[in-house]
Image (cartoon, rainbow, N blue to C red):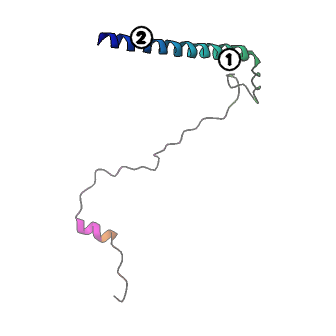
Amino acid sequence: MSAQIGATSAAVRSVVGRLFEIRFGAFTGLAFAAMTLGGCVLPTAPLVGADPADPGVKVAGVGYRSSIAPYTSLRPTAPSGWKEQNQRVAPTPKSGQ
């Protein structure tokens, strides 16, 4: 049994080793190509307008507008009966019926 486990681990180790060498070589090649071609990158486009990092540039003013401005508190309220509440929201009866 131990010989079988040893043979299996040796086979797995050799396959993993070959895959690692192949992938490591491919990764090294891609990294070298990226560093080599990095110098071929076009320069960035110049800024249009004022430089945003310049603190002396005039900008639009900042305003504040509350998101809950029309809110009014409705608490505490006195409890009312359910019949009165239903009468307030009930549709008006049609004439002639």
Q: Quadrant of the N terminus?
A: top left
Q: Amino acid at mark 1?
A: Ala
Mark 2 — residue?
10
Quadrant location, the C terminus: bottom left
User: Residue 56 placed where, x, y %?
Assistant: 70, 23
- Image position, residue 82 (x, y; %): 23, 65
- For the residues labelled 1 and 2, say whether their Cβ atoms are less than 8 Å apart: no
- 68 in magenta: yes
Question: Which residues lie in the magenta part?
Answer: 60-86
Q: Which of the 4 image quadrants contains residue 60?
A: top right
Question: Is tag 1's residue or tag 2's residue first in the polypeptide sequence?
Answer: 2
Left/right placement of residue 33 relative to residue 91 reads right
Question: Is 65 covered by the magenta stretch?
Answer: yes
Q: In the figure, 90 relative to 36: above or below?
A: below
Q: Is residue 57 above or below residue 72?
A: above
Residue placed furthest toward the bottom: 96
Query: For the residue labelled by badge 1, is the local secondary structure a helix, a strand or a loop?
Result: helix
Helix, strand, or loop for circle 2? Answer: helix
- Which residue is depicted at the point 24% across and 69% down? 83
Q: Which numbered mark, 1 or 2, is in the foreground of this view?
A: 2
Neighbourhood count class around disc 1 (C-alpha, 10 Å): few under 14, some 14–19, many 20 upward: few
Q: Position of residue 79 (x, y in %)?
A: 23, 58
Q: Which residue is more in the foreground, 34 or 63? A: 34
Q: Which mark is residue 34?
A: 1
